[in-house]
C-alpha cells in the first residue's frame, strides 16, 4: 500500500504567485542555458531545393534593432531589445514584467554550398526571415543515364 499524502490547498502566508519563477531561479539558477539577464530569440531553420531559410521571432523589434551578418561560413543574428517604459502612477497597482530585454546574438555555421553574396533578410510582423540561396554547384541535378 502507498501512504496517502494530503496537501494543504491554502497558499502559505506571504506566498506570492507572481514571484514563484523568480524565487525558483534565485534558489536553483535559471532554467535556461543562457544568461538570466538577457534573452535569445527562438529560431527555426529549414531547407528547400533552392535555399535554406532561417526564421527568428523578434517581437517588438524593428530592422534598425537587428543586424544580420555572414562571415567565414557563419550566419550571425544580433541586436538589442530595449525595455519600454509605461507612463502612469506607480501606486496604481502591482507591476509585473515577464518580457526579457537586452542584447542577443545567435550564430549558425552555414552548410556548404550557400551563396553568401545573395543572402537576403526581411523583418515583418516580428519575424526575421533570412534566405540563404544555394549556389548553382550545390543544387542537386538529375543526371540522365545513357545506355
Image (cartoon, rainbow, N blue to C red):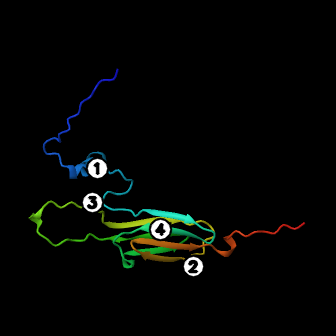
Q: Is residue 2 above or below residue 33?
A: above
The numbered mark, 4 or 1, whose residue comes first in the sequence reads 1
The numbered mark, 4 or 3, whose residue comes first in the sequence reads 4
Q: Position of residue 12 (x, y in %)?
A: 16, 41
Mark 4 vs mark 3, CA separation in Å = 23 Å
The numbered mark, 2 or 1, whose residue comes first in the sequence reads 1
Q: Quadrant for residue 77, please give it.
A: bottom left
The numbered mark, 1 or 3, whose residue comes first in the sequence reads 1
Quadrant location of the N terminus in the rendered image? top left
Marks 3 and 2: CB-CB under 8 Å? no
Q: Let me know if residue 73 appears in the view.
A: no
Judging by the rendered image, the residue that carries numbered circle 3 is 98
Local SS, label 1? helix
Mark 1 vs mark 3, CA separation in Å = 13 Å
Mark 3 vs mark 2, CA separation in Å = 38 Å
Q: Position of residue 16 (x, y in %)?
A: 18, 49
Within-10-Å neighbours for mark 3: few <14, some 14–19, many 20+:
few
Foreground residue among 37 and 125: 125
Residue furthest left as drawn: 91
Judging by the rendered image, the residue that carries numbered circle 4 is 55
Judging by the rendered image, the residue that carries numbered circle 2 is 118
Mark 4 vs mark 2, CA separation in Å = 17 Å
Residue visible at 64% across and 74% down? Answer: 135
The numbered mark, 4 or 2, whose residue comes first in the sequence reads 4
Quadrant location of the C terminus in the rendered image? bottom right
The numbered mark, 3 or 2, whose residue comes first in the sequence reads 3
* Mark in front: 3 vs 2: 3
Amino acid at each position: 500500500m502507498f501512504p496517502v499524502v494530503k496537501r494543504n490547498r491554502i497558499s502559505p502566508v506571504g506566498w506570492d504567485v507572481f514571484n514563484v519563477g523568480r524565487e525558483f531561479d534565485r534558489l536553483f539558477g535559471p532554467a535556461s542555458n543562457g544568461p538570466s539577464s538577457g534573452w535569445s530569440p527562438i529560431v527555426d531553420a529549414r531547407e528547400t531545393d533552392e535555399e535554406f531559410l532561417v526564421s527568428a521571432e523578434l517581437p517588438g523589434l524593428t530592422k534598425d534593432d537587428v543586424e544580420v551578418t555572414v562571415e567565414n561560413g557563419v550566419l550571425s543574428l544580433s541586436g538589442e531589445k530595449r525595455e519600454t517604459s509605461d507612463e502612469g502612477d506607480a501606486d496604481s497597482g502591482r507591476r509585473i514584467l515577464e518580457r526579457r530585454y537586452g542584447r542577443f546574438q545567435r550564430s549558425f555555421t552555414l552548410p556548404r554550398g550557400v551563396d553568401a553574396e545573395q543572402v537576403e533578410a526581411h523583418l515583418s510582423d516580428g519575424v526575421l526571415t533570412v534566405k540563404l540561396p544555394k549556389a548553382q554547384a550545390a543544387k542537386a541535378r538529375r543526371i540522365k543515364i545513357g545506355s
